[in-house]
Image: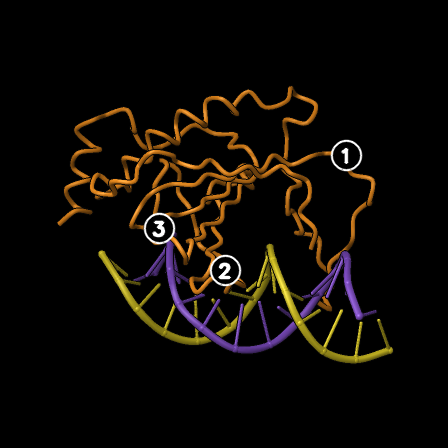
Chain colours: A orange, B purple, C yellow
Amino acid sequence: MNDPSGEIFSYSSSSPSSSSAAITSSYLSLNMLNNNHASYEQMAGPGSGSVTDGGGDELKTVSGKVNVRKPEKKVKKPKHAFQTRSQVDILDDGYRWRKYGQKAVKNNKFPRNYYRCTHQGCNVKKQVQRLSHDDGVVVTTYEGVHSHPIEKSTDNFENILTQMQIYSR
DNA sequence: CGTATTTGACCGGCGC
DNA sequence: GCGCCGGTCAAATACG
């Protein structure tokens, strides 16, 4: 497929050649995520705000065929890729994700994981991929915008510390 | 028992 | 028209 949309930009974490501080990045990276997130949260206004149709293939026939919707859909779906230094691929950003698929990627020995937000009406998708040539680097791609608040308190440092301890043991 | 994850099959698009 | 490829569904299973 052609993904020349250019929508995806890779955020290369420069500098960290030391690698040492990479421990338990599970939640550490979360901080970075939040920062970046804030930048994109602005999203377009009400017009395209509802990305509900994103991947909304709920229209199905009994034969298992999917009804194709109008090709002239101008709703653009936001897509953002993040590159994070982390040993674990489970980056918890505060939302609840349900895994719905796993596929092997060419040029990569690691599979790619597909997740979806479990919140009803929230069709936000995300996929996590690992770089085979640079272990410890995980690429997370978010697609869509959450239309509901986070259920987890991510601003509580004590919480974060606790999680870190769990992951680092 | 309810919910999340696993895993193979399936689907639509594109290239040849 | 057929086969590859990336993405998704859905049944079975695992897990609390």
Q: Are the residues flagged by discs 3 and 2 in contact, CB closer than 8 Å?
A: no
Question: For the residue marked with disc 2, what is the amino acid?
Answer: Gly
Res A15 quadrant in image? top left
Dot placed on the residue nearer the N-terminal end, 3 or 2: 3
Q: Residue at x 38, y 34 (%)?
A: A14
Q: Residue at x 13, y 50 (%)?
A: A169
Q: CA distance from mark 2 to mark 1?
A: 27 Å
Residue at numbered disc 1:
A74
Q: Secondary structure at mark 1?
A: loop
Dot placed on the residue nearer the N-terminal end, 3 or 1: 1
Nearest-to-viewer mark from 3 and 1:
3
Nearest-to-viewer mark from 3 and 2:
3
Residue at numbered disc 2:
A101
Q: In which quadrant is the N terminus of chain A drawn?
A: bottom right
Res C9 quadrant in image? bottom right
Question: For the residue marked with disc 3, what is the amino acid?
Answer: Asp
In the image, which disc is placed on residue A89? Answer: 3
Residue C15 left/right relative to B12: left
